Image (cartoon, helix red, strand yellow):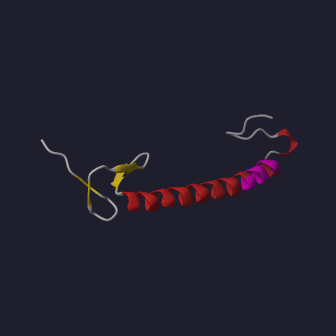
Amino acid sequence: MAVSYSCDGCGCAIKEAKVVGMVIKRDYCEACEKVANAFQEAEEAERLSVATVFKGKREKLIEQYGQSGFKLPDVPDA
């Protein structure tokens, strides 16, 4: 049984697929692999940015609602 691969980016036939992805893995040619990796890097940068903003806002909420020793749900005691 023969196996053939096509690039999930541009659709060209490829001999050796470059697999990118953690949950939904895709097969790419070398050129499209670079685009897919660039996307993942940009996505991760956005994820870190959002997480940082959320962390700061959450700390303010904990400070506001946790006054006078009020124990909040899902907030471990410091």
Residue 16: horizontal and vertical position, in percent? 30, 49
Count all numbered tags in the image, as a single digit.
Answer: 0
Q: From this viewpoint, which residue is outermost toward the right?
A: 68
Q: Which residue is at a point 69% across and 54% down the rendered structure image?
A: 52
Residue 47: horizontal and vertical position, in percent? 59, 55
Quadrant placement of the N terminus:
top left
- 58 drawn magenta: yes
Q: Which residue is at a point 45% across and 62% down the rendered structure image?
A: 35
Q: Is residue 22 left or right of residue 2?
A: right
Q: From this viewpoint, which residue is outermost toward the bottom?
A: 10
Q: From this viewpoint, which residue is outermost toward the top?
A: 77
- Quarter of the image for residue 10 reads bottom left
Residue 8: horizontal and vertical position, in percent? 32, 59
Dominant secondary structure, magenta: helix
Q: Which residue is at a point 78% across and 49% down the rendered structure image?
A: 65
Quick one: 12 or 73, which is closer to the camera? 12
- Quarter of the image for residue 78 reads top right
